Amino acid sequence: MQLFYTTHIADNKALLAEEEARHVKVLRKSANDLLHLIDGTGYLYEAVITEIVETKKAHEVHLNIVSKTLQARSRNYHFHLFIAPTKQNERIEWMLEKAIETGLDSITFIQTEHSEKSRVNMVRLEKICISAMKQSGEFYKPLMHDLCNVKNVLLSNNHAVQLIAHCNSNFEKQSLQAYAGILENTNIHILIGPEGDFSNTEITQAYDNGFKGLSLGTTRLRTETAGLYAAIGLSALLGNRN
């Protein structure tokens, strides 16, 4: 099923603009054709094209909503990934795309003591997020949060299971499988550091605030590999409800 994404839905009418409208043109759709729309909040819409507008300034597709159905979430857990952006943009972009395909509900980019990058292109990452959501047939768009200091995350109080992945052998840590009993039907926060890992101070602060140490295997993983490993590992461990 071909999905089109839009947040411009009101009064049983919908609007596709820019890239989404161009996809309609590429697929040679025309008036009275039926499209399937998603808004990222779990709803699947059936809509009929009423007008296609093409000008030098705008490319739009106008539709009438025929039906609206709330889709069940595909996972019985909520996975929020906190990760340091990589120095090369394409590596974190690749990770984001694949993590969404395998199971990601929220992502926050973090600035750490050993971080290699101090900013991220949220506009581009948002486009990648939407594309991955449509490609994988997801109805819920992952929430995306811009770069923040990891100290704000470490000091926040919440009811999630909080895990910090690191390579420091001086701190106790366990595998995802070892935590299986506390992961199901809950919010899961996993922190992934930069290539230089979290500092001793950051790890200590995490443990003092209730985080548990997470081991992702016996080999050192790149940041983007570790993020994807966490997403795939949770999916394999907890399974899908669909």
Image (tube, rainbow, N blue to C red):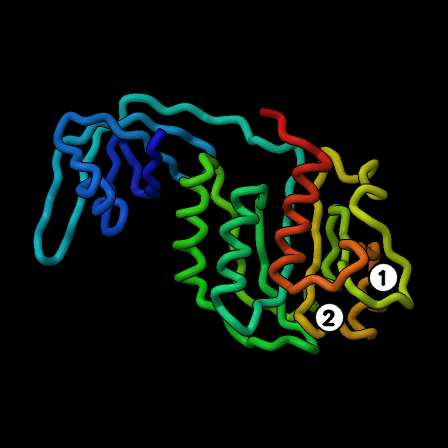
Dot placed on the residue nearer the N-terminal end, 2 or 1: 2
Whether residue 211 is visible here, answered yes or no, is no
Between the C-alphas of marks 2 and 1, the distance is 15 Å
- Mark 1: secondary structure: helix
Amino acid type assigned to the residue bearing label 2 in the image: Asp
Q: Residues within 10 Å of mark 1 (few under 14, many from 20)?
A: some
Q: Where does residue 195 sit, x and y in percent of width and height?
A: 67, 71
Dot label at residue 70: none
Q: Which residue is mark 2?
A: 197
150 or 26, which lies in front? 26
Q: Where does residue 132 sit, x and y in percent of width and height?
A: 45, 46
Callouts 2 and 1 close, C-beta under 8 Å: no
Q: Is residue 7 above or below residue 213?
A: above
- Mark 2: secondary structure: loop
64 or 177, which lies in front? 177
Corner quadrant of residue 167: bottom right
Q: How many marks?
A: 2
9 or 38, which lies in front? 38
The N terminus sits in image quarter: top left
Q: Residue extending furthest front?
A: 219
Q: Residue extending furthest left?
A: 55
The C terminus sits in image quarter: top right
Q: Which residue is mark 1?
A: 207
Q: Where does residue 196 sit, x and y in percent of width and height?
A: 71, 74
In the image: residue 44, left or right of residue 204? left
Q: Measuring 27% from the left and 45% from the top, which residue is drawn there? A: 20
Q: Where does residue 184 sit, x and y in percent of width and height?
A: 74, 35
Q: Residues within 10 Å of mark 2 (few under 14, many from 20)?
A: many
Amino acid type assigned to the residue bearing label 1 in the image: Tyr
